[in-house]
Amino acid sequence: MNRANFRILIVDDEKSFLLLMTKILEDEGYIVKGLTNPEDAIKIIDSYEPNLIITDLKMPQMDGIRFMEEVRNKNADIDFIMITAFASVDTAVSAMKKGALDYITKPLKDPEQLRIAVSKIVERQDLITENKLLKSGMFKDMPPVEILFAGMENLLSEIKNVAPTDATVIFYGETGTGKSLIAKAIHHMSSRNGPFVDINCAAIPENLLESELFGFERGAFTGALSQKKGKFELANDGTIFLDEVSEMSQSLQAKFLRVLQDRTFERLGSLNTIKTNARVIAATNRNLKTLVAEMKFREDLYYRLNVFPITIPPLRERKEYLPVIANYLVKVISARLGRGIKSISDDDLKKLATYQWPGNIRELENIIERSVIISRGQELLIPLPDTLIEIPHEAEKFEGDLKAVEKTAIRNALIKTNWNRKKAAEMLGISLRALQYKIKEYGITAEN
């Protein structure tokens, strides 16, 4: 939880100590309210809605334990920290047995004692909130956290830090690594109550992408028969995810830059300025620094986007987690298709581990879905090597050259499909436009 949204109520009849604690916690960025009378505190519980109450155990009007019980009758979810004189630690322990989570002693010799006690409560409430989100269905149709971030625990830690903020995030990673799902996870972990809106910049023709992003007015161009809101407008108060952002034209990059700078834009055919507070998450499978050097991507836009960069590793770099991911996909896909298949054979798992997975999780998902459709019984039988694209032995020397591996896999997919680009894209688990871009990039032809 963002500290700026975390409300603390301090109740202590000793004014000097109350002011000291208030100052320490306000300096940490929390919202803090201090009162000397517990009866007054009870009256404002519903309106102030504190996340945490810090209360003295010994007060003339009402002792801390009775105060805690009275508050819990109104709101059982509020956490408590007790304040006790150094000589009365036993009393504080008794209070913890009745529901207080921690205690601090006075006089407060080290302010860090208070800071640490409060930060532990914040962390605890964050975990509870995450669990509630998972159980409430906000992550419906998404893999569990342990599957989505399998082998990427450090990345999960980064996401937990950035999610509550409004910072722009950009993902760097290959096609099919789950960038869209992780962007959606960030949205759900944030406090934004608007929608999650995504758009693949590589999947929409250049002349239509601008109208998709910014919308248009009736009569703005031939075929514009009515007004249409763009993605930035639809994502207001929420999150917009721009996949393959590197595919934007130079002119569109300039308009996108303006949105990042001052959060404004106009629909096509309109002079009225529209404001948006949509949080931007972008993604690319290309090196933006290289594109900037080649003058194919605006340098100022690069720095605006690169506020919080996150690199998502390809599946081949976390193959030890492939059995967990694959078996999860089997259960989900099998249930969706009404099949009783529950697992993958050990032999097939070993074969899956020898493959380089240029299409990453998306390719794995496509292969498993096809296999579920044609399999019988409760064990998935993947028809290898017909379904998978084998990388020839001579390509092994390119183990450290991922581009060479990718080029070989694409060429083999084209050969297996008699150079049918649409079928090859499906086999690789990537979009047709992405495949066409790769064919051009690597100069792949039937002759080479």
Image: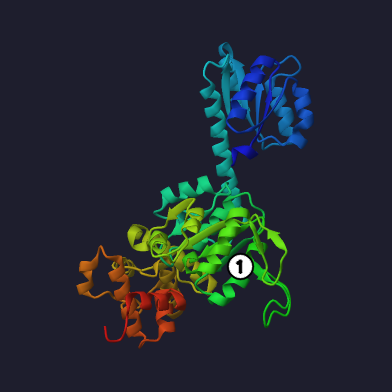
Question: Label 1: few (<14), some or many (≥20) within 10 Å?
Answer: many
Q: Is residue 100 visible?
A: no
The residue that disc 1 covers is 213
Instruction: Give the farthest residue toward the top.
Output: 87
Q: Quadrant of the C terminus?
A: bottom left
Q: Position of residue 9 (x, y in %)?
A: 68, 29
Q: Is residue 339 above or below residue 29?
A: below
Q: Is residue 139 above or below residue 437?
A: above
The structure's colour scheme is rainbow
Q: Which of these two is toward me, 128 or 239?
A: 239
Three-letter amino acid code of the residue under disc 1: Leu
Q: Residue, x 50% and y 74% (percent of image)? A: 339
Q: Which of these two is toward me, 274 or 54?
A: 274
Taking the image as shown, residue 243 lies to the left or right of residue 383, namely right
Q: Position of residue 349 (x, y in %)?
A: 33, 67
Could you say whether the residue bearing mark 1 is in a helix, strand or loop? helix
Q: Residue, x 51% and y 45% (percent of image)? A: 161
Tell me where residue 403 sits by quadrant: bottom left
Q: How many marks?
A: 1
Q: Is residue 347 above or below residue 445?
A: above
Taking the image as shown, residue 238 lies to the left or right of residue 324, namely right
Q: Quadrant of the N terminus?
A: top right
Taking the image as shown, residue 150 lies to the left or right of residue 272, namely left
Q: Position of residue 285 (x, y in %)?
A: 42, 65
Tell me where residue 234 sits by quadrant: bottom right
Q: Is residue 116 visible?
A: yes
Q: Position of residue 132 (x, y in %)?
A: 60, 49
Q: Is residue 159 above or below residue 359?
A: above
Q: Which of these two is toward me, 381 or 248?
A: 248
Q: Which of these two is toward me, 340 or 202?
A: 202
